[in-house]
Image (spheres, rainbow, N blue to C red):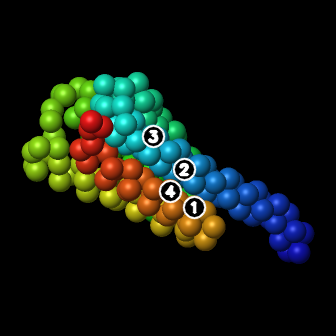
Amino acid sequence: MVENIIEMKPLEMESKEMAGMFENYYFILGVVNNLFLISIFLTVKFWGTSKVKVMGIAYLSLAAPSIYGILIARQLDIPAGYSIFLGIFTAFLLLEGLYEYVLKVPFRNNWKLLVPYLMLYWSMNYGFVVMSWENSVGQGRIMLGLFIVQLISNILSHTKKKRCE
């Protein structure tokens, strides 16, 4: 019986290592998400929407690592919160792609289209901060700081440019 316990320890350690690697994967995906959004918002603010198309398409490509994360989380039996928030993130990216690149609708002027978009946006950001914080206070603080910068740049992107005369 003691031999069985000793033999199981490496498996438990491997499982914990895999879970830690997944949590870092999730954190890195959140950092990349924030950096993309900050860049997009600041580009809109200072160079206009015409410069954002390529960045926007690159941003939408984050759906692939998000879906991969969901599959890995299920295989590793990671807590469901990670899969749920990755699902919300994927849904946000799909809705963003649908509105901006497929339908090309001015959804920001239509509350019926805007409300689901904003709900996914806020939920996705909440998930990245909270799940990272749950893993590590340091990672959570970094994610919260990036979210605050993202929020400020988002607000700035919706303000009018001042003309220099």
Q: Are marks 4 and 2 in contact (CB under 8 Å)?
A: yes
Secondary structure beneath dot 2 equals: helix
Could you tell me which secondary element the residue under label 4 belongs to? Answer: helix
For marks 4 and 1, give the CA distance.
Answer: 6 Å
Report whether 105 appears left or right of 159.
left
Residue 75 appearing in the image = no
Which of pointers 1 and 3 indicates the residue nearer the eye? 3
Q: Residues within 10 Å of mark 2 (few under 14, many from 20)?
A: some
Residue carrying label 4? 146
4 or 2: tag closer to the N-terminus:
2
Q: Which residue is mark 1?
A: 142
Q: Is residue 121 visible?
A: yes
* Residue 165 % position (x, y): 27, 36
Q: Which quadrant holds residue 58?
A: top left
Left/right of residue 56 with respect to residue 79 in the rendered view: left
Is tag 1's residue or tag 3's residue first in the polypeptide sequence?
Answer: 3
- Residue 37 coordinates in the image, percent (x, y): 42, 44
Cβ atoms under marks 2 and 1 closer than 8 Å: yes
Left or right of 13 in this view: 56: left
Residue assigned mark 3: 39
Instruction: Report the amino acid beneath label 1.
Output: Ile
The image quadrant that residue 106 belongs to is top left
Tag 3's secondary structure?
A: helix
**Residue indicated by mark 2:** 31
Location of residue 100 with respect to 143 vertically, above or below: above
Mark 4 closeness class: few <14, some 14–19, many ≥20 residues within 10 Å = many
The three-letter code of the residue at mark 3 reads Ser
